[in-house]
Amino acid sequence: MLFGRKKQRSREEITGERSGRDLSRLYAPDGIELFPRHIRTSGRYRRVYAVPVLPAALTPGFLERVFSLGDVEVSVHLFPVPAREASQKLTRKLTEVLSQLHLEVERQGKIGNLPVLETLKRQIEEVRQLVQLGQDRMYYCCLLFSVMAPSEEELERRASIFESETGGMGLKVQALEFWQDRALHHLMPLGVLPPFSSRWGYQNLLSGGAMCLSPFISSEIGHASGAFLGFIEHTYVPVFLDLFSKELLSPHMFIFGQTGSGKSVTASVLVGRNLALGRRAAVLDPEGEYRILTEKMGGLHVRLDPAYEAGFNVMDLEPEYDERTGDSYVDVPGKVREVVALFSSVLEFRGRKLTVEEETTMEEALRELYGERGITRDPESLYERGKALPDGSFAVGRVRKRMPTISELVARVEEKDPELASLLRPFTKGGTLGFLDCETDVSTSEAPIICFDLRATEKDATLRYYATQAVFLWLWERFVKACRQVEKIVLVDEAWVFMRHKNSVEFLLNAAKRGRKYKAGLLIATQSFRDFASDDGRNIIAQCSSSLLMRCKAEEARLLVDTLGLPEGVYRKLPSFQLKGQGVLKVGEESMAPVTVYVIPWEWELLEKQPDDMF
């Protein structure tokens, strides 16, 4: 129409888009600067990688090392393959393998690839059977990584670290040159599947392999690796706890809960799972509950009973480590003081306090015994050349010198002070406290776990006190200090028993403060918090970077919350737990969440307990 009304154009026609409907407007940056191997958006540089090769075997959480690098984004695209298509592809692949097998082996007589081809044939047949029977499913997988940095130089540095780390994991990563803008689009959480081409590195995975690409890190609490503990309440996210993580100030943990809360089972499975990680453990067991675990894990069970020799010598020496100089040395004067303090404290516990002169006499006798063996500050002085042994065999190389025994100490003291010797005679072989008068004949270097069973000492206060102090002394020398380079856990179960004696408290406090230097983590479990409400008790707990607070009475919960300065919600939560194994896990200074400890079915058999003992 010549003079008709001019049609008014819509906003969509003017802008070329439908306002409010284009999702790209929600995530598009202000601008994009493209480079062949990276891209710059919003002032940050990033490089996107595809993964054309995955490791032959995938394990749950194998990408955690990548997640923990920081400034790395991961995008996993999974597309289910129809069963018919998967079966056809597997049949075609099997035909290719059979043809190659026939051509190389049967016709040409080449057997170099025979083992590989037969293994591949068997694997394809097994996978095809699983898919055809509906027991498993196949997926197409595309894995993309993005490394980010504030500058090009920093990007190159981080990319180098990333490529080195993934190479060590068996991943082959490939920067998507000239495709960085396309890769960024598929990296974002839009559900846009990359095209099916070799450039994007698609892989075929079964359900198990696809599951292994899922992140197992809890955003609420826990670590990327370590021992599996259980699940977060309500969200059921798995929690892994690494007591020796560099994120923690110390490797110590405090477990508290009333009788029947699942405390001992929790401590047992934590010890067992840390042993599976290659760590070692020592257990102070007042109730005799850890014998079965120790024996089934191939450990050493030491029964502290007046009727048996304990098998370890409290007068053994081990080198110390000087952090200032980096050298090792033998602290003979320190050991002399420790042994004198041991006997002095036990005699005082029995009602006879030693005089300064008597303690000096004992010190002189000990120095003479060590001096006669040529033991000095030099660690090499603890050894001698190979020689004939009492059993008729011959030792080659360095042999550890025989250490003094309690009988030898008492005999030397008798030459100087007969009255003091008579006080010490019950500690010699044949006396009521003579079960420690022996040479060390247990090898802690080979046992993954050693358990000190104190149950036989519960009826005699003096006997338990002496056994406890001796174990502390020997444990520090021959387990903590002697295995300096090995991560190890010292479990103190029913710790309230040890908090009633000053010397035991001093040992726990010393171990809590110095344990990290020797890669030793304390795992303290107790059913009574009141014994830790003292200044020393609070200091011990303050050294623990991790804690698991389980069910307890309201009065105990109030004392715990007020003493440790915990949120009021913890006070309301602790008495409300209904199931064994439930607790509030605190890791570090800020992370805290309610969790449920999970015991794997075969672990019940290992512990010889029933699920009713826990849940």
Image (tube, rainbow, N blue to C red):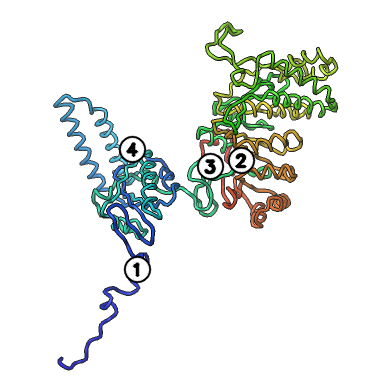
Q: Which of marks 2 and 3 is nearer the N terminus?
A: 3
Please name the residue shown 43% across and 45% down the image.
Answer: 64
Label 3: how many residues lie within 10 Å, few (<14), some (14-19) or many (20+)? some
Compare marks 4 and 1 and give the one earlier in the sequence.
1
x and y, in percent, of residue 151 in the image:
38, 54
Q: Residue furthest bottom?
A: 3
Q: Give the amino acid type for the residue marked by disc 4 in the picture.
A: Ala
Name the quadrant containing residue 540: top right
Q: Which mark is residue 252?
A: 2
Q: Is residue 9 above or below residue 78?
A: below
What is the quadrant of residue 46 in the picture? bottom left
Label at residue 245: 3
How many angstroms separate mark 1 from mark 3 (CA)?
A: 42 Å
Q: Using the image, determine if residue 423 lies above or below residue 73.
A: above
- Asked whether disc 4 touches disc 1, contact meaning CB atoms under 8 Å apart, the reply is no
Q: Where is residue 268 in the image (x, y as percent from the top left)?
A: 59, 36
Badge 1: few (under 14), some or many (20 or more) residues near its Cα, within 10 Å? few
Q: Which mark lies nearer to you, 4 or 2?
A: 2
* Dot 2 crowding, Cα within 10 Å, few <14, some 14–19, many 20+: many
Which type of secondary structure does the marked residue at label 2 adopt?
loop
Identify whether 336 is placed above or below 546: above
Q: How far apart are marks 4 and 2 (CA)?
A: 37 Å
Residue 25: numbered disc: 1
Residue name at image x 72 percent, y 39 percent: 496
Q: Which of 456 and 384 is in front in this view?
A: 384
Separation of marks 2 and 3 at Cα, in angstroms? 11 Å
